[in-house]
Amino acid sequence: MFYPIQTLLLSLSWLGIFGFITFLITGHLYKIIPFLVWYERFSPYVGKRKVPMLADMIPVKSANMQFLFSTFGVVVISIGLLFINEVVYKSGVSLLSVGAIFLLKDILYMIRFKEDVF
């Protein structure tokens, strides 16, 4: 019944899962991890000395690069799935992998954020 539009359904489901849910989870990681690290390391010093803001704990340029690579990767993969092109699909996977490396680098930066950095 769905055979004529099977590639369209596959591409739309890819966009629904990775284009929405994955970016929702990634956004929450950029919000939760700095808060947890700040609460653990800097909350005892509130009112006693200068403490960093949560926005200071996020590497903005790297986070923007992660967003761009991941966005382009999801879009290119959905185009590769839609037109059943393996080369386009693999190039989208490589873009998404670079975005994942940026995400890992950002998470490690946020976890290792020290008070002497600020």
Image (cartoon, grey):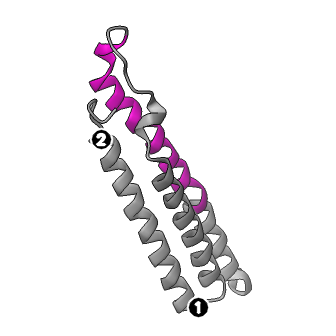
Quadrant in which residue 7 is drawn = bottom right
Between disc 2 and disc 1, whose residue precedes? 1
Q: Secondary structure at mark 1?
A: loop
User: In this orientation, which residue lies closer to the viewer: 70 or 106?
Assistant: 106
Give the tally of numbered discs.
Answer: 2
The magenta segment: 19-46
User: Does 101 sit left or right of 80 as displayed?
Assistant: left
Residue 17 coordinates in the image, percent (x, y): 56, 61
Q: Going 58% across and 64% down the picture, which residue do you hit?
A: 71
Residue 10 in sight in this render: no
Q: Residues within 10 Å of mark 1 (few under 14, many from 20)?
A: few
Residue corresponding to mark 2: 111
Q: Amino acid at mark 1?
A: Asn
Residue corresponding to mark 1: 85
Residue at far top of view: 47
Distance from label 2 to label 1 (Cα)? 39 Å
Q: Going 60% across and 89% down the picture, which residue do you hit?
A: 84
User: Does 40 sit left or right of 7 as displayed?
Assistant: left
Residue 48 coordinates in the image, percent (x, y): 32, 9
Residue 68 coordinates in the image, percent (x, y): 57, 63
Most frequent secondary structure within the magenta stretch: helix
Task: Identify the image quadrant of the N terminus.
Answer: bottom right
Q: Going 31% across and 22% down the picture, which residue do you hit?
A: 42
Quadrant in which residue 8 is drawn = bottom right
114 inside magenta stretch: no
Residue 12 in sight in this render: yes
Which disc number belongs to residue 2? none
